[in-house]
């Protein structure tokens, strides 16, 4: 059985091999990085590009990763201020059999395709989805246009990299806006395991 450290490195390599763009946060730490995530096709999130912050605990994969959106997304199960994600498979039913590719190719696309307004982190979005699905869809698209077009991606030099899949540790790592950094600091460590409990208690 491989060590947690080896497993982290292997899962990052799998993401790279699946053509995901990764950006290490600082000091080349494989436990704290960002992934460029595209909204799933044939949904209101299509065309959006999000920077997703991933933090792997020391006990990964036996403990689930922390997942949070950096740029804004309008979704019932994503906290608008912190970007925290309320996703059962990450928060409660995580298994070491899952890996990071599962998160970005299955779990997050399913979450965006099938929002769950009955277990919200964004109460306004949940209420709007239930009361007026058409207005909800319009609001999602409005947020995509304002915050998640490719030109809004919070990594100004990532598109200029000569290698699409290279891990970078340049100034892009600090390219998140000051407001977003403050929000992340306020909610550090709360991206996943406690994100749904406040709504379920």
Image (cartoon, helix red, strand yellow):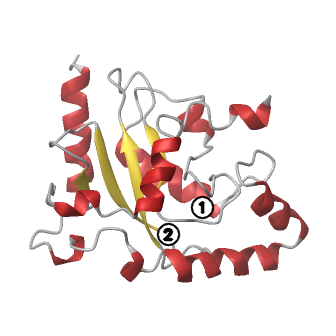
Contact between labelled residues 1 and 2, with CB atoms less than 8 Å apart:
yes
Could you say where residue 12 lies in the image, as x and y percent from the top left? 24, 44
Mark with earlier residue (2, 1): 2
Q: Farthest residue to the top: give it.
A: 1
For mark 2, what is the residue? Answer: 39
Q: Residue at 51% of width from left, 75% of height from top?
A: 147
Could you say where residue 186 lies in the image, as x and y percent from the top left? 52, 42
For mark 1, what is the residue? Answer: 112
Taking the image as shown, residue 127 lies to the left or right of residue 183, namely right
Q: Using the image, determine if residue 70 lies above or below residue 1.
A: below
Q: What element carries label 2?
A: loop
Instruction: Indicate the quadrant containing the C terminus: top left, top right, bottom left or bottom right.
Output: top right
Could you say where residue 130 lies in the image, as x and y percent from the top left? 86, 63
Q: Residue at 63% of width from left, 44% of height from top?
A: 86
Q: What element carries label 1?
A: helix
Q: Using the image, determine if residue 46 lies above or below residue 86.
A: below
């Amino acid at each position: 059985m491989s060590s947690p450290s080896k497993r982290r490195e292997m899962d990052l390599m799998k993401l790279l091999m699946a053509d995901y763009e990764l950006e290490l946060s600082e000091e080349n730490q494989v436990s704290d990085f960002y992934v460029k995530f595209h909204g799933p096709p044939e949904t209101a999130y299509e065309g959006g590009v999000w920077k997703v912050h991933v933090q792997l605990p020391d006990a990964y994969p036996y403990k689930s990763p922390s997942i949070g959106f950096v740029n804004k997304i309008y979704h019932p199960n994503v906290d608008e201020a912190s970007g925290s994600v309320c996703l059962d498979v990450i928060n409660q039913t995580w298994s070491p059999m899952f890996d990071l590719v599962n998160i970005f190719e299955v779990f997050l696309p399913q979450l965006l395709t099938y929002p769950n307004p009955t277990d919200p982190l964004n109460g306004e979005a949940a209420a709007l989805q239930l009361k007026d699905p058409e207005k909800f869809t319009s609001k999602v698209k409005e947020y995509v246009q304002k915050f998640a077009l490719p030109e809004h991606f919070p990594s100004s030099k990532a598109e200029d990299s000569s290698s699409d899949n290279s891990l970078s540790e340049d100034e892009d790592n600090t390219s998140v806006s000051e407001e977003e950094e403050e929000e992340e600091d306020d909610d550090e460590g709360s991206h996943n395991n406690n994100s749904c409990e406040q709504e379920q208690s």
